[in-house]
Image (cartoon, helix red, strand yellow):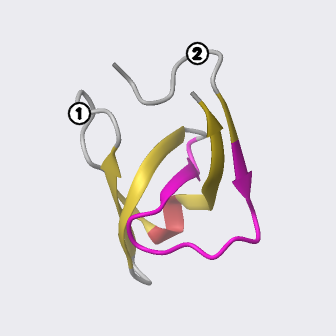
């Protein structure tokens, strides 16, 4: 099952420090919003791990990332 299901609520913090292994929500320049785990962030790209094994682990060019915020709480 997905970790986050319809009806679950998450809270993200725009000011929270983000580190490897944190669960994050990202928004890409094409409007896609995803909940993932941060694997690595460089000046060129962001590598993420899917929380749901049914989805691929994306690598997003830094220029295509509009924002990334750490998940600080979830109702599950």
Compared to residue 11, the image places residue 21 above or below, namely: below
The location of residue 51, given as percent across then percent down, is 35, 41
- Which type of secondary structure does the marked residue at label 1 adopt? loop
Q: Which residue is mark 1?
A: 53
Local packing at callout 2 (Cα closer than 10 Å; few below 14, some 14-19, many 20+) is: few
The location of residue 22, given as percent across then percent down, is 47, 62
Q: Give me the disc on residue 75.
A: none
Q: Earlier in the sequence, mark 2 or mark 1?
A: 2
Q: Which residue is mark 2?
A: 6
The location of residue 39, given as percent across then percent down, is 33, 66
Residue 76 figure quarter: top right
- Distance, label 2 to label 1, CA atoms, is 17 Å
Local packing at callout 1 (Cα closer than 10 Å; few below 14, some 14-19, many 20+) is: few
Where the N terminus falls, by quadrant?
Answer: top left
Residue 56 figure quarter: top left
The stretch in magenta equals 11-30
């Amino acid at each position: 099952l997905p970790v986050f299901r319809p009806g679950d609520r998450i809270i993200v913090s725009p000011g929270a420090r983000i580190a490897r292994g944190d669960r994050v929500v990202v928004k890409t320049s094409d409007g896609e919003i995803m909940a993932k785990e941060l694997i690595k962030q460089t000046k060129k790209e962001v590598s993420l791990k899917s929380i749901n094994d049914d989805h691929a682990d994306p690598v997003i060019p830094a220029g295509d990332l509009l924002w990334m915020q750490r998940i600080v709480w979830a109702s599950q």
